Each structure stands twice: as C-alpha cells, then as structure tokens.
Amino acid sequence: MALRTAVLRHLRVPVTGSNQSQIGFLGSIRAFSSHDDHLSKQEVVDRVLDVVKCFPKVDPAKVTPDVHFQKDLGLDSLDTVEIVMAIEEEFKLEIPDKEADKIDSCPLAIEYVFNHPMSS
Amino acid sequence: MSGVSTAAYFARRAAQKERVRILYRRALKDTLNWAVHRHIFYRDASDLREKFNANQDVEDVDRIDKLIGHGEAEYNKWRHPDPYIVPWAPGGSKFCRNPTPPAGIEIVYNYGQEDNP
C-alpha cells in the first residue's frame, strides 16, 4: 500500500512546501485569467464526500475521507468507475483513462483532485 | 484449457478487468455525449450497466476475451463524432491557448519614450 502510494506520487504534480508555493503562486498569477481559483483542501474533501454520499448504492453514514470504495463501501469496480466520472464532472476535470483506473479510494481521489492544477 | 490458477492466469484476468473498466468508462462518457439531458442519460446508463452486469459471472478466459472484443467493437460503432472534451484538455478549445509566459520576462512600460529617455 505504501509502495503503491509512493509510486502514484511520482505520477502526479506534488504539492510543494509553503515558501516555494508562495513564490510559484506569485509567478503564475495573471490578471483577468479565468483560472485563478485554487481550491482549499477542506473544500475538496467536502465536495468529494458529497459526491460519494449522493451515489445511490452508498450508505451515507459510512463515508469518511479515508474510505476505500470496494473494501469499505462494498462497491463494484464498475461503481468505482461511475464515482470517478461523477468526481470528474463535479470538478470539471478530464482524467486520463490510466489515471482514472488507479483511483480506488477516497484519499486517492481527494489527493488527485487537490493536486490537479485545473480543478475548479 | 484454463483451469490452472497460475500467476499468468491471474495476470490475464487482471488485464481483462482493467480493459472492462476502461471500456465501461469510455462507453459511459459516450452515452453522456449522445444523451445530453440527464433523465435520458440515466436511463441509457442503467441499460449499459445491465449489459455489463449480465456477463459479470463468466469464468472462461477466452469467452471473456471475446465478450470484451464484442464490447469494444460496439463502442467503436457508437462513438460520437463530436465528443465533449473539457476545454483545457487536449482536443478542447482552450488547449495551449494562453500558456503562462516564461519566468523572468519583464515588460517595461515606457510608451513613446524610447527615443527620448
């Protein structure tokens, strides 16, 4: 599990430290840009949990930020695909097929959405 | 003759499951392309899910391969000619449109003062 997350971390944009992100942020601000809202982690968590809770086959009481779709919620692999698509629609993202196949649990989904530069 | 549960068998089954998942994902997105209104989309999505669920207990590896082949052929038949792509993604309208300028470039605003500084 740790190896898997370590490998997955190499496939995504990592969140840098606070100093670096400040300077990088200043360098990337553009006036009148339509992409200047970076979500906060709490907002991402709340929205992802809302999406999972609204899924008809899921019991809303069991949903926590570190729940695994197949092990904890008892969902099918096709249900996981549906949830990933719902998260894509919620955050207006386009996740490539290989990446979407790897998203298996809530913490992975939250991490992917948070690290994606274009999530809104 | 695929009764022996070796590592190769499991690897093949895992590859098939991944193919099925990717096929389901693409078919669902295509359904969303064709059926834009949500109530129609939900109906078509449940039909698609029924089609996938009808074959989920097949154990014979070759038969699974054939079914996946049929499914992919049908997906290719039904692909939308103008799919919705998120604008900033490859193929969308905003892709590569306003790239961030390279760092360290400064614009000096001295309008009309180039000749007499």
Image: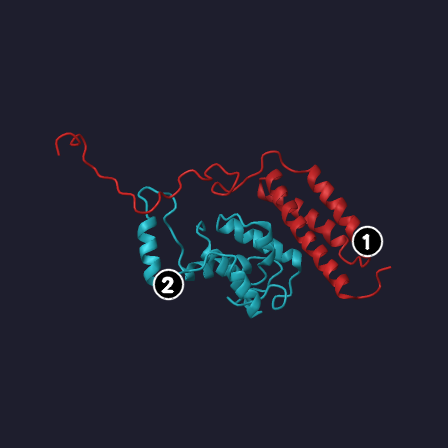
Chain colours: A cyan, B red
Secondary element at image label 2: loop
Q: Is residue A18 above or below residue B115?
A: below
Left or right? Give the position of B72 relative to B98.
right
In this view, the residue farthest toward the right is B1
x, y percent for residue A26: 30, 52
x, y percent for residue B12: 74, 58
Is residue B23 in view?
Answer: yes
Q: Quadrant of the N terminus of chain A?
A: bottom right
Question: How many C-alpha atoms fall within 10 Å of the one at disc 1: few (<14), some, or many (≥20)?
Answer: few
Q: Is residue B30 above or below residue A69?
A: above
Left or right? Give the position of A60 relative to A37.
right
Q: Nearer the viewer, residue A78 or B97?
A: B97
Secondary element at image label 1: helix
Q: Which residue is denoted by mark 2 in the rendering?
A: A17
Residue located at (34% from left, 54% from top): A24
x, y percent for residue A51: 53, 57
Amino acid marked by disc 2: Gly
What chain is tagged by disc 1? Answer: B
Left or right? Give the position of A76 relative to A66.
right
Residues at marks 1 and 2, CA–CA distance in whole angstroms: 50 Å
The disc label shown at residue A21, or none = none
Amino acid marked by disc 1: Asp
The disc label shown at residue B62, or none = 1
What chain is tagged by disc 2? Answer: A
Is residue B43 in view?
Answer: no
User: Residue A99, located in which quarter of the rendered image?
Assistant: bottom right
Residue located at (50% from left, 43% from top): B89
Q: Is residue A93 above or below residue A8?
A: above
Residue located at (32% from left, 50% from top): A27
Residue located at (53% from left, 68% from top): A66
Asked whether the residues under the numbered discs 1 and 2 touch, taking CB atoms below 8 Å apart as contact, a structural biologist would say no
x, y percent for residue A116: 46, 53
